Image: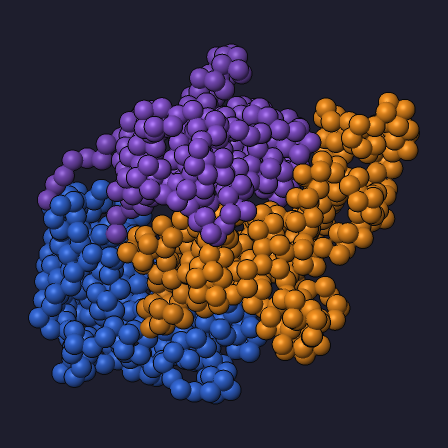
Chain colours: A orange, B purple, C blue
Amino acid sequence: MGTLSALLRRLLMTLVVIVCVSIITFLATRLLPTDPAALYAGPRASAEKIDAARLALGLDKPLVSQYLTFAGDALRGDFGVSFRTRQPISADIARFLPATLELIVAAMFLALVIGIPLGVIAAARPEGKLDQVLRLFAISLASIPGFWVAMILQLVFFKWLNWLPLSGRVSTETMLFSPIESITGMGTVDALITRNWVAFRDAFAHLILPALTLSLYPIGLALRMTRGAMGAVMSERHITTARAMGLSQSTILFRFALKNAIVPVLTVLGLTFAFSLTGAVLVEVIFDWPGLGAYVTAAILAVDFPVIMAVTLVGTVIYVGINFLVDLAQAMLDPRVRLS
Amino acid sequence: MRHAAPTHRRPGPRPILSLWGLDRVGTLSFVVIAVILGCIALAPFLTGYPEQGLGTPGPDRLVAPSSEHIMGTDRLGRDLWARILYGGRLSVLLAVLVVSLAVIIGTPLGIIAGYFGGWVDEVIMRVVDVFLAFPPLLLAIFLSALLGPGLLNLVLAIGLGWWPWYTRIARAQVLSYRQRPFVEAAEFMGVHPVTIMRRHLLPFVGTPVMIQSTLDLGSAILTVAALSFLGLGLPPPTPDWGQIISEGRVYFPDRWWYVTFPGLAIFTVALAFNLLGDSIRHSRESEHSRATNHEPS
Amino acid sequence: MSYLDIDNLSVTLPHGQGYRHVVKGVSLTLNKGEILGIVGESGSGKTMTCSALLSLLPAGAHRTADRLQLDSLDLTSVSPASVRGRLISMISQDPAAALNPVFTIQAHIDAVLKQHTDKNRHNRRTAVLELLDAVGLPDPLRVSKRYPHQLSGGMQQRAVIAMALSAGAQVLIADEPTTALDVSVQAKILDLLQSLRHNLALSVLLVSHDLAVIAQVCDRVVVMLNGEIVETGTVQSVIQAPHHPYTKALLAASPARHQRGNPLPTVASSYLNSGFDHD
């Protein structure tokens, strides 16, 4: 009974946080020294042109009404137009988001599928050899600059071994001879749905290196968080009982203990998502992956405010939303707090 | 089989020196950090091309590693080893500034939130929540794009997203010491809250903050490199690891050295700080569990 | 011929630079269908003795024995996995902690059945209900679907016993099985152990610090002090005519036989401290 109201409270908090995030994002663009009107008017614009831009953007109005306009538009999915391309930003985001999501989902999948089992194995013998090696492994993964390792992977798998494509989402041949029909906007998924196997193979091959690069940090993260949560569970009395009843080590680790640790391990989901999202910015640049990251990077170089603002806002809202879902899942999974 | 009675430690922060109870990995990473700091401090003496390190073009462009240029040269003919040494100065400086900024903003706020509680705590922690709602790096990218290039702007952009972690740590620490007799006694005697926070609570906050900041130095170096790789760093010809990699990308993979060596530099420094921080934390945790799991069978 | 035969069992734990003996040359026998009490203060080595049987000792511990024999099987020559749950099971003090909070009772017992038998899903399901019924739980179907925190302490302990016996273990080590329970529930759990012994010919090693509990259900009792057995005998002989001064002291300190109005005696401190290293 208390759980439902707690979740409602949590939902309310999430909404408040999103509003605050939008305020901070908005204020930053208005209070920091760069003048949006000057940027909108373009380089070497005359004073009159800048004033006209100021009027057009509504920058002469009080901050509160400016914010309300901005927030109202954003709620309707309207983020204005890009200073650089003069295109509506929402349309751009809708076009680039699926590619980024495809990449992030692939990276998160790798992170969870590799990181969680390694964390469980590390917890089998606390402070044992394997535990220590895996600890070093996780820390190394957290210390690698992703944009650099991306290039090293390209060197090895493209240049030396020639196993995988250098960059992009599909090769030119695929685009010409077996183009992927866009349904979800995620290349591999669309190819799968339309049973376009040639294109699927190709899109999949293109996905491997970027997804792998993006998953390195989250793998380490998932490993360490799983190890931590499992460490606490493994010292509990019911694990000794399970041993005394003769359950095998693997049953104890992967069935009994892991389900206990799953609530803290789930937080990994939110975190890996966050790190994949920001990591995507760099990875997309290197692999010419046409997603939000590449989009925002181009915007950064052109000081294209509304785009940077919109992507920050969208990214944050997705992140906050995922965290809320994780909380929800945790509440559902733990029978002690489950709605009865 | 008698042995000495357990020593009862005076409750209080342990002296800094006890941190040297590090394991092998920790000690090794400490030595590596010391060597790296030594190298960048002595940069002018470790390279024959100090002026190239700072930005002056050299005669031989994109030369592969040789005895002359052990790490090769860049597109302007500058010795990469020299560039990396001088770039290290900047990286470490920026990382230290970022972490210091975060500690200076975050720690006092956490102590205040934990000490006063009530609405003060509520307000501070809600602000913390909002800042933590931004995915890491995204806020830094956003702010540094708005602030424009420059050393201080870069520090601000990253540090502004980082302080909430220290607020959390400091608050948690204060909450666990808030009700101790020595704090209540001081309150009872009418000691000024600021004095209580500074004298009685700050010392307990020190160690966890120090561990976190060591770990964060590694992350800060990576973040600085990422931002400068994206073109949000300092303008050329300032030597900067992320920027060197970004320049070298055009010549990659043919001129492999251009990208490889600065990347290795970032990796090494970040790894050393992360390992050091982790091993400090690890040694303290196991000490802690030894101290608490002490019940007779 | 005794069923379980332990001869000269010793356990050492690493201690500082060297090691220390926590179990010193313990020899005892347990007959089929017998309940043997092990009594002693905490730290006297009774739990370690039991853990040693299942090879569930803490890291670094070392076990030696001249003989560890169950029926005709040499326990030192077989893998711990083939002993735990199949031949010997152990239940412990706090049933709430012994059950995994995120699994139903059904899942607990099912896991043990799955580990040790080749019954299919359906048969395991039936077996779970039979086991729950056998340990005297009312409405087995309902109980099987419950999570541990939804059951009372007594029901939890019955469920743990069902889990312990599910793979056909013939020896049950019950380490302070009633200490965490209410007095009224205690008696019912002890009754259950009695009836299991009669119905299944189960042999029980009942560890307790409470002589009243031991007196209620055990046939014979061993008294342990500092890792050694100081007295053995039938419950009657030990309680009525204790030989060892420590047993006398224990008996005197037992509230059950204490007379109202006189101060409660304590176990002589000389016995607690002799060569004892509590830290």
Query: Measured along the vertical axis of the image, is residue A166 above or below residue B120?
Result: below
In the rendered structure, the answer to whether residue A340 lies left or right of residue C195 reads right
**Most foreground residue, A174 or C157:** A174
Residue C173 appears at what percent x and percent y? 29, 69
Q: Measuring 8% from the left and 70% from the top, which residue is drawn there?
A: C66
Which of the image's four quarters has the N terminus of chain A?
A: bottom right
Answer above or below: position of C272 versus A116: above
Percent position of residue A269, x then y: 57, 55
Q: Tell me the residue at 67%/59% (across/down).
A: A99
Quarter location, residue B29: top left
Question: Quick one: A193 or C58, which is closer to the camera?
Answer: A193
Asked if residue A305 lies left or right of residue A150, the reply is right
Task: Residue B137: give x, y in percent of width and height.
Answer: 59, 40
Q: Position of residue A85 (x, y in %)?
A: 79, 44
Q: Name the residue nearer the viewer: A31 or B112.
A: A31
Residue B138 seen from this side: yes
Q: Residue at x 36, y 72 (%)?
A: A247
The residue nearer to you, when weighing C123 against C129, is: C123
Picture quadrant of residue B110 = top right
Q: Relative to residue A204, is residue A129 drawn left or right?
A: left
Q: Residue furthest front?
A: B59
How many numbered marks appear?
0
Q: Considering only vertical position in the picture, is C177 above or below A305?
A: below
* On-image quarter of the C terminus of chain A: bottom right
Is residue C138 among what the camera can see? no
| Residue B180 in the image: above or below residue A224 | above
Residue drawn at x 38%, y 62% is A121
